[in-house]
Amino acid sequence: MPFHCDDERTNEWAYETLNELTHHADSSALDPKNSDAIKSLVEVVPAISFKQKPTIEPPTWATDPRSRALKFQTLTMDDLYKQSIDNDFRLPKREVIDEAGYKHSWLFYPPIVDSPRMLMVRII
């Protein structure tokens, strides 16, 4: 799960961090006294990895139940473009994707942190 790290001990830390960041991105979980400040520090956004071959297995972190908050999906290009309409995110023109030979994709929703601002906020 942690990028370029083969030490299994870091996985538990990564899942705990994912849970905490997802919690902060969820407006219902915020402290009403400081909700705007914390909510603006963590944003959940769509992330896409384009694939040319359909046989590429999802990474182990994507199939682990502790990463359910990422909403990881393996999609065809048709399904990805439907998702982009339903969930209001932009993709390159379909011709560009087809020309590049992409047939499948991974779609997931990671929390993105405004790290410099997060370091200035005290979260209890």
Image: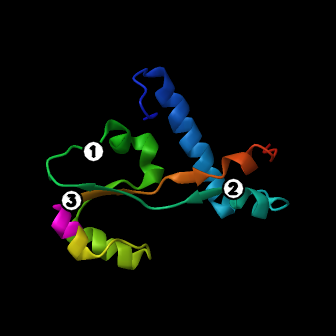
Which amino acid, mark 3? His
**Along the horizontal axis of the image, is 111 left or right of 103?**
right
Q: Which residues are magenta?
A: 97-102
Q: Which residue is depicted at the point 43% across and 20% down?
A: 7
Name the main secondary structure of what is drawn in magenta: helix
To which residue does mark 1 refer?
58
**Along the horizontal axis of the image, is 60 left or right of 45?**
left
Q: Which residue is depicted at the point 31% across and 40% down?
A: 59
- The answer to if 100 sits in the magenta stretch is yes
**Residue 6 position within the rendered picture, expressed as x and y whole percent measured from the top left:** 39, 23
To which residue does mark 2 refer?
41
Which amino acid, mark 2? Leu
Q: Residues within 10 Å of mark 2 (few under 14, many from 20)?
A: many
**Residue 101 position within the rendered picture, expressed as x and y whole percent measured from the top left:** 15, 61
Distance of label 2 from label 3 (alpha carbons): 32 Å
**Placement of 90 over or under 12, stated as above or below:** below
Q: Nearer the viewer, mark 3 or mark 1?
A: 3
**Placement of 95 over or under 123, stated as above or below:** below
- Looking at marks 1 and 2 on the same chain, the residue that comes earlier in the sequence is marked by 2
Residue 58 in which image quadrant: top left
- Looking at marks 2 and 3 on the same chain, the residue that comes earlier in the sequence is marked by 2
Q: Which residue is depicted at the point 57% across and 53% down?
A: 112
